Image (cartoon, rainbow, N blue to C red):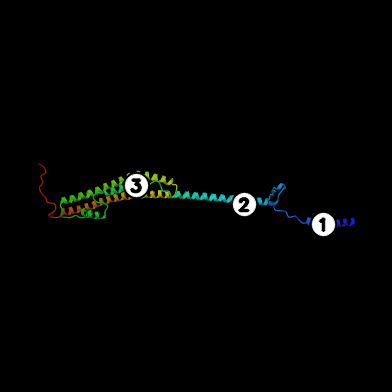
Amino acid sequence: MTRKITFRSAGTSLLALALAMPMAMSPIAAPPAQALFGIGGGPFIVYDPTNHAENLLTAARALEQINNQIAQLQNEAQMLINQARNLANLPYSALQQIQQNVSRTQQLLAQAQNIAFDVQSIDQMFQQDYGNLSLTATDQQLIAEARSRWENTVGGLQDAMRVQAGVVGNIDANRAEMSALVGQSQNAVGALQATQAGNQLLALQSQQLSDLIAVISANGRANALTEAERATAAEQGRIQRERFLTPGSGYQPGNAQMFN
């Protein structure tokens, strides 16, 4: 009876061992790293080189993107600063001095004597003093007309000299303005200031050209009056010679007492 019990117990043990062997030999699935716990319940530290390299690469790309954004913002800020400089007005104007120079020259031309720079006035004065010679005019009339023409010529020469003096007087003011404008152009902070300085230099050059035209016009007017007087004097001489040589109305002989 005792033997049976032993045999059956041994068989039972063998059966239990046979059933337990497949479970012991099957692979054990490892839990994920965050599910692993060590002694005392604390987590195990698992180092993954591939994941660490990917994290560093991602952080480097993010940092590069941030740097690019900062550089872009800096470029935009500099662009706005440059635009503000390009829109800044020139803090200097030579317009008043240029207008004063032009007004001075215009006043000198307006003070021209006898024959002004006006087409209608010129036609009228030439018809009166240079185109109205008559054989029947008296000697006093001829003398008066010749004197009027001489006054016109002398007045034209005087006007030309006055205009020349005024233009020469503008040279010093023009030189000062030119120096100031060139300095403003060189120190311009933006395109608008440089353009405005260049425009004022062109205006100054135009004023100088106007002075030159005024001088040429005054000299030409004086020369024209001189030539007109010469031509009229020649015609008057012809008339007087013809009158002198006309029988009965020219020279009449008479007695003259030279000594007491």
Q: Residue placed at 45% from the left, 49% from the top? A: 84
Judging by the rendered image, the residue that carries numbered circle 3 is 96
Q: Which residue is mark 1?
A: 16
Q: Which residue is mark 2?
A: 58
Q: Hey, what amino acid is under mark 3?
A: Gln
User: Is label 1 in a helix, a strand or a loop?
Assistant: helix
**Residue 81 point in image, percent of width and height:** 47, 48
Q: Residue at x 82, y 57 (%)?
A: 16
Towards the viewer: 139 or 111: 111
Judge by depth and name the residue closer to the eye, 166 or 53.
Answer: 53
Q: Are marks 3 and 2 in contact (CB under 8 Å)?
A: no
Per the model, the C-alpha gap separating discs 1 and 3 is: 120 Å
Q: Mark 3 against mark 2, which lies toward the viewer? A: 2
Residues under labels 1 and 2: Cα distance? 55 Å
Residue 35 location (% of width, % of height):
69, 52
What amino acid type is highlighted by mark number 1? Ala
In the picture, which quadrant includes the C terminus?
A: top left
Quarter of the figure with the N terminus: bottom right
Q: Quadrant of residue 126?
A: bottom left
Neighbor class of circle 2 (other Cα within 10 Å; few <14, some 14-19, many 20+) is few
Eye-nearest disc, 1 or 2: 1
Dividing the picture into quadrants, the one containing residue 17 is: bottom right
Q: Residues within 10 Å of mark 1 (few under 14, many from 20)?
A: few
Q: What kind of element bears circle 3?
A: helix
Label 3 to label 2: alpha-carbon separation:
66 Å
- Check contact, mark 1 vs mark 3: CB within 8 A: no
- Determine whether 186 is above or below 17 in the image: above
